Image (cartoon, grey):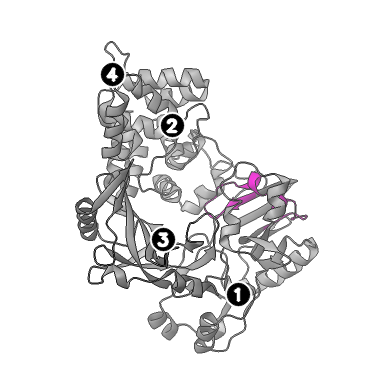
């Protein structure tokens, strides 16, 4: 556990992508099987211990120390695993420190009652707070060390000097602790087979378009344009009677969308956008969220929020891999393939005609009524481009709409996680509206925790501490009056009506665009401004 805890600690305190990549690669190279395989599974989110619940941890620590004292400690630290690791009152006479594989294999074979006892014994045996913290992060499944699953796979690929796409194609054919994968990368055996039905194919991604630079280099005749739909990018596969639905990062979400799985009748693999659609019309992203992140769905939920796939590309047709074909030819075959499915849950993202970049800019700024009003912007795809895993520069571009901006007042703040656990970095903000008596009051409209520098974070944190009105567990309410408070210029991608929010509206991807130290809170925007955006 010591080497693994050191890795997590260093990752949580490092912001550089390349530095994180080096840390993981060195750990995998220096650690033996099966520990490195289990660590990789944890870093990629492939571990799930059903017998362990976060409430176990709290009950265990409150059984050993005063509950109120722990509550104060948790409030101060802001993270359950970190708070427990710092205050854990170990019992003398504990056994030796556990190794990583011992912890994993022990929990995989434990009942709930056994798991709690084992976790307590391991906490007793681990002498350092950092090691206890790593154990708790591992067993609760929330590492939150700023490392994506794809970056971890890139570190694995670097061991054998192969493309990360090769690792991704193998991934769903392998199981932790991935010993055949490491054996191949180290040249000890042949490459494992990826010939499992309905496997994931690494997705091709687009570069953000720089209008000032790219339009001077690109020929509009060489590119096709289509809308960038506001759902989630997915891959739908059907091979040898097996159907799977993956996110663009390879997460299997098949159980959540059985209605979409059944729509693909022929063997093939489609790349597209997962949406909620009613009578052929795209619904808001909020409707899709009702289906996401659920382990199971029932008939009532599927009827209320009918999911569908809007296809972008054809990656395989029957037994033929079509990724090496040019985009224009893949589109022709895609259209014929979707027509043959004859299912309302699969349609095609239409190509948008344009003759020049100014024409396309006008289309992006003023989309026609209907589905395009839901779109996030436009995609540009080079007509002769093959389907290449990753984010190559040149073949595909995304040109998102300019974000909406609104001035909102900071109302509540909460501590962050990891290296931000000592700072108030998660913010709830609101806009002005009229109360029953005709006065002006703030109503919350969104939350954000990024979009500012480290120096700005320190300044905001000081403002929160100096202007706290009340505390609700880890949350502080902040002074927010017309003449006293802090204004954020908030950027967001869109709005939708919501019954879950007091204001009646919900923001899409809100983030802090600018901190308006110069602006009095009384001059922040009104709820009516947001209502007008919905009109």
Mark 1 surroundings within 10 Å by alpha-carbon count, few (fewer than 14), some (14 through 19), many (20 or more): many
Report the number of numbered marks.
4
Evaluate if marks 3 and 4 touch, with contact meaning CB atoms under 8 Å apart.
no
The percent position of residue 202, horizontal first and vertical second, equals 54, 55
Q: For mark 3, what is the residue?
A: 443
Magenta segment range? Answer: 245-269
Element type at mark 2: helix
Q: Which residue does the image show at 21% across and 56% down from the upper left?
A: 463
Q: Within 10 angstroms of label 2, few (less than 14), some, or many (20 or more) residues?
A: some
The label shown at residue 54 is 2
Give 70 or 531, whichever is nearer the viewer. 531
User: Pointer 1: what residue?
Assistant: 372
Q: In the rendered image of this protein, does residue 101 appear above or below residue 461?
A: above
Examine the structure image and report whether residue 300 is included in the region drawn in magenta. no
**Residues marked 2 and 3 touching at CB (< 8 Å):** no
Report the Cα–Cα distance between label 4 and label 1.
Answer: 60 Å
Between disc 3 and disc 1, the foreground one is 3
Judge whether residue 248 is colored magenta: yes
Q: Sequence order check: which comes first, mark 4 or mark 2?
A: 2
Q: Is residue 316 above or below residue 87?
A: below
The quarter of the rendered structure image containing the N terminus is: top left
Side of 92 where 331 appears, left or right: right
Task: Out of 474 and 248, give the one closest to the viewer.
Answer: 474
């Amino acid at each position: 556990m010591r080497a693994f805890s050191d890795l997590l600690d260093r990752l949580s305190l490092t912001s550089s992508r390349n530095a994180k990549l080096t840390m993981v690669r060195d750990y995998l190279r220096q650690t033996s099987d099966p520990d490195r395989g289990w660590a990789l599974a944890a870093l990629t989110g492939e571990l799930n211990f059903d017998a362990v619940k976060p409430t176990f941890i709290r009950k265990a620590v409150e059984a050993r120390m005063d509950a109120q004292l722990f509550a104060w400690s948790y409030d101060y630290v802001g993270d359950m695993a970190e708070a427990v690791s710092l205050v854990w009152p170990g019992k003398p006479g504990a056994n030796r420190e556990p190794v990583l594989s011992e912890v994993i294999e022990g929990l995989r074979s434990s009942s709930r009652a056994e798991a709690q006892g084992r976790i307590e014994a391991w906490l007793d045996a681990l002498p350092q707070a950092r090691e206890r913290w790593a154990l708790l992060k591992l067993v609760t499944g929330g590492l939150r060390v700023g490392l994506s699953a794809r970056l971890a796979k890139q570190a694995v690929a670097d061991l054998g000097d192969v493309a990360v796409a090769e690792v991704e194609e193998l991934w769903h054919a392998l199981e932790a602790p991935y010993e055949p994968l490491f054996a191949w990368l180290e040249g000890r055996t042949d490459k494992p087979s990826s010939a499992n039905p309905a496997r994931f194919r690494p997705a091709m991604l687009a570069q953000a378009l720089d209008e000032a630079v790219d339009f001077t280099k690109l020929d509009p005749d060489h590119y096709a344009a289509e809308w960038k739909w506001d759902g989630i990018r997915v891959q739908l596969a059907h091979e040898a009677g097996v159907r799977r639905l993956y996110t663009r990062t390879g997460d299997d979400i098949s159980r959540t969308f059985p209605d979409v799985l059944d729509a693909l009748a022929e063997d093939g693999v489609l790349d597209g956008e997962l949406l909620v659609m009613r009578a052929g019309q795209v619904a808001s992203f909020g409707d899709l969220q009702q289906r996401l992140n659920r382990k199971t769905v029932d008939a009532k939920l599927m009827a209320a929020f009918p999911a569908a796939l809007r296809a972008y590309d054809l990656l395989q047709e029957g037994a033929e891999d079509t990724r090496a074909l040019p985009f224009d030819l893949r589109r022709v075959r895609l259209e014929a393939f979707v027509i043959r499915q004859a299912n309302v849950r699969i349609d095609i993202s239409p190509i948008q005609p344009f003759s020049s970049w100014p024409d396309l800019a006008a289309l992006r700024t003023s989309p026609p009524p209907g589905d395009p009003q839901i779109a996030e912007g436009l995609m540009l795809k080079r007509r002769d481009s093959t389907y290449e895993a990753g984010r190559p520069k040149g073949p595909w571009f995304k040109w998102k709409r300019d974000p909406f901006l609104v001035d909102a007042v900071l109302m509540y703040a909460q501590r962050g996680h990891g290296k931000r656990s000592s700072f108030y970095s998660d913010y709830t903000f609101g806009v002005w509206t009229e109360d029953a008596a005709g006065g002006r009051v703030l109503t919350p409209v969104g939350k954000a925790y990024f979009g500012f520098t480290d120096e700005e974070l320190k300044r905001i944190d000081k403002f929160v501490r100096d202007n706290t009105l009340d505390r609700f567990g880890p949350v502080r309410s902040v002074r927010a009056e017309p003449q006293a408070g802090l204004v954020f210029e908030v950027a967001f991608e869109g709005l939708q009506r919501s019954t879950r929010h007091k204001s009646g509206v919900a923001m899409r991807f809100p983030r802090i665009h600018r901190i308006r130290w110069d602006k009095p809170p009384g001059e922040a925007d009104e709820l009516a401004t947001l209502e007008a955006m919905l009109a």
